[in-house]
Each structure stands twice: as C-alpha cells, then as structure tokens.
Amino acid sequence: MVTPGELQQIASKISLTHLYTLKSIKLQVKQITLAQKELKVIKKELSAVVRNIN
C-alpha cells in the first residue's frame, strides 16, 4: 500500500518549476510523465483493494 509520504513525493514531481531552457522543460515533462505512470499503478492497486472489500 502507498503511504502519504510516497504520494507527497510523487506530487512534488508534478509541477513545472524551471522554465529557463528547453532541456530543463523536457526533463520536467519526462518526470511528470513518470509520475503519472506511478499514479496509474497506485490507482489500479487501490481499485483492487476496494473491489476486495466489496
């Protein structure tokens, strides 16, 4: 199961902060994409847990 700290860590990756260069923007977009993938996995895990409860 995911802890609130892990969710906070993922959430910290989902923001564009340094818009100085194209390279930094590309890196941040890549990090956001990876964070989205992590969140999708968590969502599937939580859905499975909820199904088991019901």
Image (cartoon, rainbow, N blue to C red):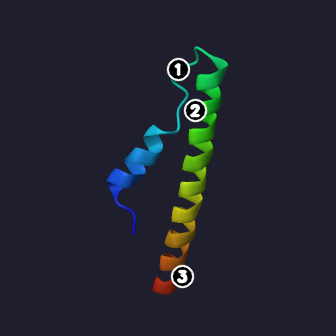
Is the residue 53 above or below the residue 1 in the image? below
Residue ID at (34%, 60%):
3
Decide which of tag 1 and tag 3 comes sooner along the chain: 1
Q: Residue at x 54, y 56 (%)?
A: 38
Q: Mark 1 near mark 3, Cβ–Cβ under 8 Å?
A: no
Dot 3: within a 10 Å radius of its alpha carbon, few (fewer than 14), some, or many (20 or more) residues? few
Q: Residues within 10 Å of mark 2 (few under 14, many from 20)?
A: some
Residue, disc 1: 18
**Which residue matches tag 2?**
28
| Element type at mark 3 | helix
**Which residue is identified by label 3?**
51
Where does the N terminus fall, quadrant-wise? bottom left
Instruction: Name the residue nearer the viewer: 4 or 25.
Output: 25
Q: On screen, 16 above or below 10?
A: above
Mark pair 1, 3: CA separation: 41 Å
Could you tell whether 10 is left or right of 19 in the image?
left
* Count of residue discs: 3
Residue at the front extreme of this rendering: 23
Q: Quadrant of residue 24?
A: top right
Quote the CA–CA distance across marks 2 and 3: 34 Å
Q: Residue at x 62, y 39 (%)?
A: 30
Percent across and percent down for residue 32 are: 58, 41
Instruction: Confirm or deny contact between disc 2 and disc 1 (CB under 8 A).
Output: yes
Mark 2 residue element: helix
The percent position of residue 20, horizontal first and vertical second, equals: 58, 14
Q: Earlier in the sequence, mark 2 or mark 1?
A: 1
Question: What's the amino acid at mark 3?
Answer: Arg
- Is residue 15 positioned above or below 6 on the image? above
The residue under label 2 is which amino acid type? Answer: Gln
